[in-house]
Structures are given as C-alpha cells and as structure tokens.
Image (cartoon, rainbow, N blue to C red):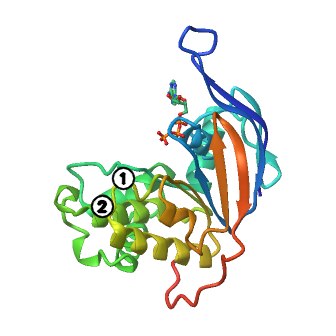
Amino acid sequence: MIELYDIHKIYNQGQSNQVNAVRDVTITLDLNQTSVLKGPSGSGKTTLLSLIGCLSRPTSGRIMLNGEVISNLPEAYMSEIRRRTFGFIFQRFNLIRGLSVLENVMVPAYPSGGDHGALIVRGKELLSLLELGSKADMSVEALSGGESQRVAIARALINDPSIVIADEPTANLDTALSEQFLQIIGQLREAGKTIIMTSHDPRIWQAEIVDRVISMKDGGIEEDQINEAAHEHPWHEVIA
Ligand SMILES: Nc1ncnc2c1ncn2[C@@H]1O[C@H](COP(=O)(O)OP(=O)(O)OP(=O)(O)O)[C@@H](O)[C@H]1O
C-alpha cells in the first residue's frame, strides 16, 4: 500500500516565483491496481507522480510504502528504494542515443551490479515479450515511436519492479499504439504489478484495465473514482 498524508510540494519556496504544485494531498493507493492521475496542465500530476516514485521529496507531509515511511530517508536509501521498487516510463521515453536497444534496457540494472550474463538474458527475454527480440542490437535512433515506447517499457521492467510509474505514456502515440500500450499494461496488472500513470487521454481513463481515476486541480485532489468495469482479462501471456 502507498499512503500519502498531508502532502505539499512547493517549488522555489519564499521566492517571487514560488509554486504550490501539490497541496494537502492525502490518499491511499492499493497495490496490484492501475491508477490514473488526470487533470489540467499544471494541476500537479507529474509532481505527485515524482513524489510517489521517490524522484523528489515533499516539502511537508509523509509518504509510506508498505507501512514504512519513505519520504524522509537519506538520499542513498531513497535511491535504493527507487531502484528496487519502481520502474519508470517517461513521456519522451528518454532512451539514450548511441546505445543499443538492449543496452538501454539494461541501464537501470547497472547500479545493482550482479551477473552481467544473467542481465543480458533477462533484457533479451523482456525484449522478446514486447516483440522487439530482433531489434536488441539495433541503435535506438532507428526505432519507430511505438518501438521506442516498448523499449522504455522493457527498461522499466528490468529490475522487476512491483510498481510501474508512467508519465503521459501515450502522449506521443497514435490510437493503435495506445491500444497496444493498454494491452501491455493489462498484462502487467494481471502479473500483479501496481501501475500509476498520468494521462490527458480519455482512452486511458476509460480503459477497463484502469481501476481508479484520480482527478487533480490546482495541486489538490478534486475527484477520486473507482472504475467498477475494471475486471480480469484472459491474457494468454503474462509478463512476470
Ligand atoms: N522543477 C520545477 N520548478 C518550478 N516549478 C515547477 C517545477 N516542476 C513543476 N513546476 C510547476 O508546478 C506546477 C505543477 O506542475 P506539474 O508538472 O506537476 O503539472 P502537470 O499536471 O503534470 O502538468 P502537465 O499536464 O502539463 O504535464 C506547474 O505550475 C509547474 O509549472
């Protein structure tokens, strides 16, 4: 369970350009569910996502993961939790040019050390599951948008995170690729992953694999809806 209590995030505090990006957010997110944050541009979605994913710290308030407070840990502990627990999919995919597809997928695993051979095997397995097995050695510059996104998904999964965080994951995808993305998210959900996304895309909020839609406005939570239609899918293949 992820619990947020009285969370505030203020950028440039005390300066003329101060922004109260997240205000007074108290919310509990269950594990093994897919939640989507929606709301107008500037409403604080990305900021809240980055706080949940230990990419930044709240100005005040407390964040707990499975009963442990994580918002006040020293940076070394926080980055270890980040690496162990979360996988990130960014809007622009943030692939590293000059590296191959497989090398990009392996990047988040490097700080943990470990068996390089086993890592290559896992990276290739993930690429195969995402139908990119034949592109492992290709440079990322040569990929299409949909392929780049699937590489970003494989990279997010390399450390077998329990929580996948995705910021506007379909912003650069057409309808068919967005559908494909939702199918992959459905598989991850079936495999027991917790998925937290931001999205402006009604196709995402309305998808039946989405359990909960949280609407933000001016840094606060305006509405919190459970999607009753979210139900089990008979996925043939599950990404473990
Ligand atoms: N690093 C930062 N420094 C200063 N202000 C910031 C920073 N990051 C975000 N903000 C501001 O905080 C507010 C919330 O931004 P945030 O990116 O969380 O919104 P959002 O809902 O994700 O928007 P969008 O849908 O456009 O991505 C905005 O006013 C933004 O300008």
Contact between labelled residues 2 and 1, with CB atoms less than 8 Å apart:
yes
Which residue position is annotated with label 1?
93
Picture coordinates of residue 52 (x, y %)? Answer: 65, 45
Picture coordinates of residue 76 (x, y %)? Answer: 61, 37
Q: Which of 34 and 226 is in front in this view?
A: 226
How dense is the environment of label 2, judged by Cα within 10 Å: few (below 14), some, or many (20 and up)?
many
Q: Nearer the viewer, residue 203 or 185?
A: 203
Q: In this view, does 229 lie to the left or right of 238?
A: right
Q: Residue at x 75, y 62 (%)?
A: 30
Q: Is residue 185 above or below residue 64?
A: below
Q: Which amino acid does label 2 sit on?
A: Ser
Which mark identifies residue 148? Answer: 2
Q: Nearer the viewer, residue 195 or 217?
A: 217
Q: Is residue 215 visible?
A: yes
* Callout 2 secondary element: helix
Q: In this view, does 43 lie above or below 123?
A: above
The image quadrant where one finds the N terminus is bottom right
Q: Is mark 2 within 8 Å of ligand 1?
A: no
Q: Is mark 1 within 8 Å of ligand 1?
A: no
Q: What residue type is labelled 1?
A: Phe
Q: Nearer the viewer, residue 54 or 81?
A: 54
Which label's residue is closer to the chain start, 1 or 2?
1
Q: Residue at x 49, y 87 (%)?
A: 237
Q: In this view, does 10 lie to the left or right of 207?
A: right
Which mark identifies residue 187? Answer: none
Q: Is residue 165 left or right of residue 3?
A: left
Picture coordinates of residue 197 (x, y %)? Answer: 55, 56
Q: Is residue 129 left or right of residue 81?
A: left
The image quadrant where one finds the C terminus is bottom right
CA separation in Å, label 1 and label 2? 7 Å
